[in-house]
Amino acid sequence: MHGSCEVFMSASYKEDIRALKLFAEMEEANFDALMRGAYVQNFPPRIDLIHEEHRPDFLHVVLTGSVDLYTSWNGRESSMATVRPISTFILAATINDLPYLMSARTLERSRIALVSSKDVRQIFSKDPAFARAIVTELAQCYRSVIKNAKDLKLRTSLERLANYILRQQARTASTEFDLKMEKRRLASYLGMTPENLSRAFKGLEPYGVKVSSNHITITDPEDLARFAKPNPLIDDHTT
Amino acid sequence: MHGSCEVFMSASYKEDIRALKLFAEMEEANFDALMRGAYVQNFPPRIDLIHEEHRPDFLHVVLTGSVDLYTSWNGRESSMATVRPISTFILAATINDLPYLMSARTLERSRIALVSSKDVRQIFSKDPAFARAIVTELAQCYRSVIKNAKDLKLRTSLERLANYILRQQARTASTEFDLKMEKRRLASYLGMTPENLSRAFKGLEPYGVKVSSNHITITDPEDLARFAKPNPLIDDHTT
DNA sequence: GCTATCGATTGACATTTGTCAATTATTGAT
DNA sequence: ATCAATAATTGACAAATGTCAATCGATAGC
């Protein structure tokens, strides 16, 4: 499939997955059963992993690289989220055995673990610790999307960009950083066109944002924050 | 509180709540324990039930009436969802014991059951059937918000309105119906201003939409659908 | 190093959406 | 029924955002 290299679950991958909150507390025997029906694949960049409307045969776990969740309608396309190691995606579809609402493609070369959806559902029914972990994870995903919807509905594109930059500042704990994706994808994620993003970067210059290629420097964080008015109930994606 | 009338859980309310998928399969003893720490309140219209940033002391169940979930930032406000009987709201905050991301207010006179969040979390840990039901519910809520975000990112306001009207057509199984909320709230829900909504209704006239006060008539459903291009992965809120 | 390709940027312009103010319609209270 | 308050509509205008075409710039393959 896509010329990628399939390997069965090695001990090292198993450890990485076991370290995920989602799998950390479940029974050893159940975890082993899950892993027996799982495997790991390497994918080149820009490969479609799943497509919306399809049924969820596998729960995906990003081990390395990164994955873009995107969606299309009527010839338009929009990037909805980026999944980075180590976390899962499309858990909700897997659990309720319903069609994917989003497509997924690799952004860069990525190693993905594929865990049988059927196994997940079956073990979820008999392992209370796993069920609890799934609930916590789902609740967090839900809150994340709500924050996203608030960002979209309450803010202009300039404000969304300003707050995005401040979130990156918080994430990297630094006033300068490199954008981790193409600007066109960032534009799509923020709900605007690439042209508008270009102008938005210009529009933030007066508030102390310098852009050179994909390197961002925040020269005046206070000023930027005064404009962006970040709010934990929108911008803090850890709670 | 708010001059409303508090009553303890009557047998009839208990039955209504027990009939909810969320509570239907759990152990009788656990359900009774939940209900012992619960009560029912009647609220007049436009009463704030909860406010974002607050901690979730109670899981709310709408028994009659309807509740608007909304959010604010920087002086702006946006309606995010309407909760109708019989269903719960703010389950995700309750489960993870995290601050509400949205505020809630009654739209009309409503009867709301309040179930102690602490009890929910405690019984969720020991009742597997309840845990499973919570997972299903959360997964559905998550998918609902994703659909909402897709609607916002992929469609213009005219398209959102057109699809909203088609969803009401499907829900009422009729080509005419009354809007269940003020137009200003509908506008906010659809992510536009009331003025823009007025014009959007006008803009749909050529596609066979007639508006008189809050009564909508679809004279040419096929034509409207050709324009709106409804898609189950955005518009079908049952899956 | 050269060139083809693709993303980023820019300018001109169109469309969409929002704002403000005035007017009309509706609703609720007396 | 009347009046006050609030919602809805409309017009004129402004701001935000998108579209298209041209150009610039980075980069991968040769």
Image: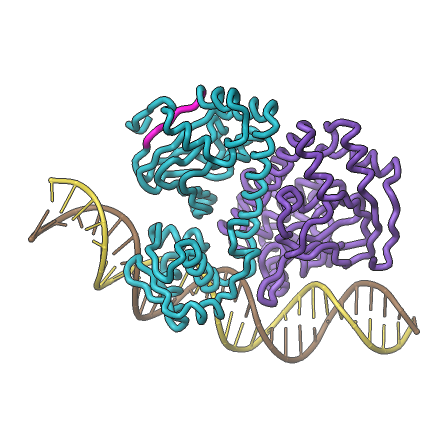
Chain colours: A purple, B cyan, C yellow, D brown
* Residue C30 in picture, x, y percent from top left: 11, 40
Task: Tell me, yes or no, if residue B119 can be seen here.
Answer: no
* Residue D20 in picture, x, y percent from top left: 60, 77
In the foreground, A169 or A63: A63
In the foreground, B128 or B105: B128
Q: Which residues are magenta?
A: B37-42
Looking at the image, which residue is at 79% across and 35% down?
A33
* Residue D6 in picture, x, y percent from top left: 27, 48
Looking at the image, which residue is at 44% across and 71% down?
B223
Q: Main secondary structure of the magenta part?
A: strand
Image quadrant of residue B15? top left
Image quadrant of residue A141? top right
Decide whether residue A211 is among the magenta residues: no
The number of discs equals 0
In the foreground, A153 or B232: B232
* Residue B181 in picture, x, y percent from top left: 35, 50
Task: Tell me, yes or no, if residue A136 can be seen here.
Answer: yes
Q: Is residue A37 left or right of residue B33?
A: right
Looking at the image, which residue is at 34% across and 64% down?
B217
Q: Quadrant of the N terminus of chain B?
A: top left
In the foreground, A10 or B94: A10
Looking at the image, which residue is at 58% across and 39% down?
B136
Q: Is residue A208 above or below residue B159?
A: above
